[in-house]
Structure formats: structure tokens, C-alpha cells
Image (spheres, helix red, strand yellow):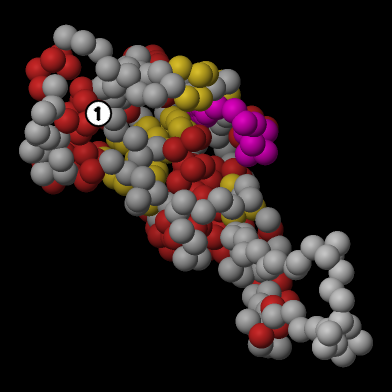
């Protein structure tokens, strides 16, 4: 390991034996000795913590990401290795339009890091930060950009500040406490098993006339709808079709909108190309249907984030 640069060497991991606390000779308990009941027992607690698999500087991590992107997106190498961006790089009317569903991407990021480390999905872990610089490079790949939009909800994350600093129009909304009405799809799965068979004693057609609600809790409201509106603005206002880069895996109906997939389909019908940036475990199966993929061909593609999770980890 001494031949490996210190910036990329993995951290020293303690062995199982070193984690076992042994009593010293001076403090060994003697027979018939009185035990002080005021001293609380020492209980070893296991805590899941997400740490980088390879310890390296931010520069080394960004360099590794750039090299990976050049290999994976060879068609964009001209933009990725350009020594200087054009003066119209950030306001090119023919550039790409980037939209980020922050909650979907950021929650999926933590879930992916857990899977890569064998941490149960239900386990609580300290907050990990996503490098928005790295995410922006992955999504944009230094192509000329016409529009950048990010929408999310509280709590505020450091990545939101970075997104705003690099030119993203950010809408960060407060969560609200409410009982959300169930969509038709949610009602169907509430009354049917995973094979589509109705449960015995179900309400059946009664749900069609009587609204049903999920238990009240703190939820996002209006976040998806903001992105839907911004996508439609691009489709309507742009002089000619370009490329939409949409970072989300969501395809379901929103509370006040038919959902991301409907917006994507509208853009595709108008001649736009769409790149869906998502985690493989968070993407809706609707985007992977054979008839959907065959219908749009090269105009629609999915960019999976899984292979870039370690480069996205800001430590």
C-alpha cells in the first residue's frame, strides 16, 4: 500500500478484536469486592455511519469523476475537455434545460450509499452531503445550458446553496402537515394485492365517489408542480426543441398535476430529447416499459447515477 498515493489510500479500519474493551490489571474486579452501584455500565452501541470507501481530496474525487464521464459519455468529450467555455455557455437559447427534483435525488443518494455498504435501508444514519458541483457536471457535462431549475423542500441542505451559486433557479418550500387524498393508482393498490386481485371485503366501487386520504403527516406540497410548470414553459417558450435533462425517477401523478411522465411525453411529442437522470432503485417501471422505449427511440435515454455515488459524496 505504500506505493499508493496517500490521498487515495483507504482509511485504517479497526479490527473486531480491537473494539472489545478489556479490563486493565489495575482495575480488575477482585473476589468479594464491593461494586460501586453509582457507576453506569459501559454498553457498546453499534452506529451506522457512511464514510467514503476511498479517502481522497476533493480535487482527486472530481478528477476521477471527470475521467469516468469522458469514458461513459464519449459523445460529449468535446464539451468535457474544452479548455474554455463559450461566452454564451450559460445563456445559449439552443442549450439544454436542466430540472432537478431534489428530494427524489437526495433521498435516493443516501439509500444508494446504504446499499453499497450493506447498511439496512431502515437504519438511521447521520446526514451525508451530496456534492452539487459533481452532480451538475454529471448532468450538464459542460454542454451549453439555456435553463437550470431545482425544486425541493426543507430542511435546507448545503447543496441548495451551491446550486444557487452555480446558476440554478431554486425553489425550496416548507413542508405542510396534511392528509393527502389518495390517487387512483394508490387506491388501486390499497384494494388489490400485488397480483391485481381485489382483497375480500374491499370497498370496491365505493372509492370512486368517496375521497380517501392517507394519514396526516408532514409532506411536500407544490414541489413537483413547480418543476412541471417550468418544463412546460421551456417546451412552449423555446424557439426550437432542445434537450431536457430531468433528474428524478418519479412518474406518478402529483397532487395538483398529472406527473412527470406526462410532462416528459408532452416534450417528446414536440420533438424534444429527454435525458432522465435517476437511481436504478428509485426509477419508476413506467420509464422502462419496452413499448415506451421503442416509441421514442434515441429521443429518450436514462442516465443511472449508481456508478457515480462515491464521486458524489461530499466529505
Q: Is residue 8 left or right of residue 271?
A: right
Image: magenta residue range: 146-161
Residue 168 visible in this rendered orientation of the protein = yes
Q: Is residue 156 magenta?
A: yes
Q: Residue at x 61, y 70 (%)?
A: 54
| Residue 118 coordinates in the image, percent (x, y) | 47, 65
Residue 137 visible in this rendered orientation of the protein = no
Question: Which residue is more in the foreground, 305 or 124?
Answer: 124
Q: Quadrant of the image for the N terminus?
A: bottom right
Q: Residue furthest top?
A: 209
Q: Quadrant of residue 200?
A: top left
Q: Is residue 66 above or below residue 180?
A: below
Q: Is residue 57 above or below residue 272?
A: below
Residue position for label 1: 186
Q: Residue at x 58, y 68 (%)?
A: 53
Q: Residue at x 46, y 58 (%)?
A: 120
Question: Which residue is more in the foreground, 245 or 181?
Answer: 181
Q: Which secondary structure, mark 1?
A: helix
Q: Residue at x 11, y 28 (%)?
A: 201
Q: Quadrant of the image for the C terminus?
A: bottom right
| Residue 299 coordinates in the image, percent (x, y) | 25, 39
Question: Which residue is more in the foreground, 48 or 254?
Answer: 48
Amino acid at each position: 500500500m505504500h506505493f499508493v498515493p496517500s490521498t487515495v489510500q483507504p482509511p485504517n479500519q479497526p479490527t473486531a478484536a480491537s473494539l472489545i474493551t478489556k479490563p486493565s490489571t489495575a482495575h480488575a474486579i477482585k473476589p468479594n469486592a464491593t461494586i460501586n452501584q453509582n457507576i453506569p455500565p459501559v454498553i457498546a452501541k453499534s452506529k451506522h455511519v457512511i464514510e467514503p470507501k476511498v479517502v481522497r481530496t476533493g480535487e482527486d474525487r472530481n478528477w476521477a469523476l471527470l475521467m469516468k464521464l469522458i469514458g461513459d459519455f464519449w459523445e460529449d468529450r468535446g464539451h468535457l475537455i474544452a479548455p474554455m467555455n463559450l461566452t454564451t455557455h450559460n445563456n445559449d437559447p439552443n442549450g439544454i434545460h436542466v430540472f432537478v427534483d431534489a428530494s427524489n435525488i437526495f433521498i435516493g443518494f443516501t439509500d444508494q450509499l446504504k446499499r453499497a455498504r450493506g447498511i439496512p435501508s431502515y437504519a438511521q444514519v447521520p446526514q451525508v452531503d451530496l456534492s452539487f458541483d459533481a452532480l451538475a457536471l454529471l448532468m450538464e457535462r459542460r454542454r451549453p445550458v439555456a435553463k437550470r431549475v431545482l425544486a425541493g423542500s426543507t430542511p435546507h441542505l448545503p447543496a441548495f446553496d451551491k446550486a444557487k451559486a452555480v446558476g440554478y433557479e431554486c425553489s425550496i418550500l416548507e413542508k405542510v402537515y396534511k392528509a393527502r387524498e389518495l390517487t387512483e393508482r394508490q387506491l388501486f393498490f390499497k384494494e388489490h394485492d400485488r397480483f391485481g386481485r381485489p382483497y375480500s371485503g374491499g370497498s370496491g366501487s365505493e372509492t370512486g365517489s368517496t375521497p380517501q386520504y392517507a394519514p396526516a403527516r408532514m409532506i411536500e406540497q407544490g414541489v413537483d408542480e413547480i418543476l412541471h410548470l417550468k418544463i412546460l414553459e421551456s417546451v412552449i417558450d423555446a424557439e426550437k426543441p432542445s434537450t431536457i435533462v430531468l433528474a428524478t425517477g418519479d412518474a406518478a401523478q402529483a397532487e395538483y398535476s398529472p406527473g412527470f411522465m406526462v410532462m416528459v411525453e408532452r416534450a417528446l411529442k414536440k420533438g424534444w430529447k429527454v435525458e432522465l437522470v435517476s437511481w436504478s432503485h428509485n426509477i419508476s417501471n413506467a420509464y422502462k416499459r419496452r413499448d415506451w422505449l421503442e416509441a421514442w427511440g434515441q429521443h429518450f435515454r436514462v442516465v443511472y447515477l449508481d456508478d457515480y455515488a462515491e464521486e458524489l459524496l461530499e466529505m
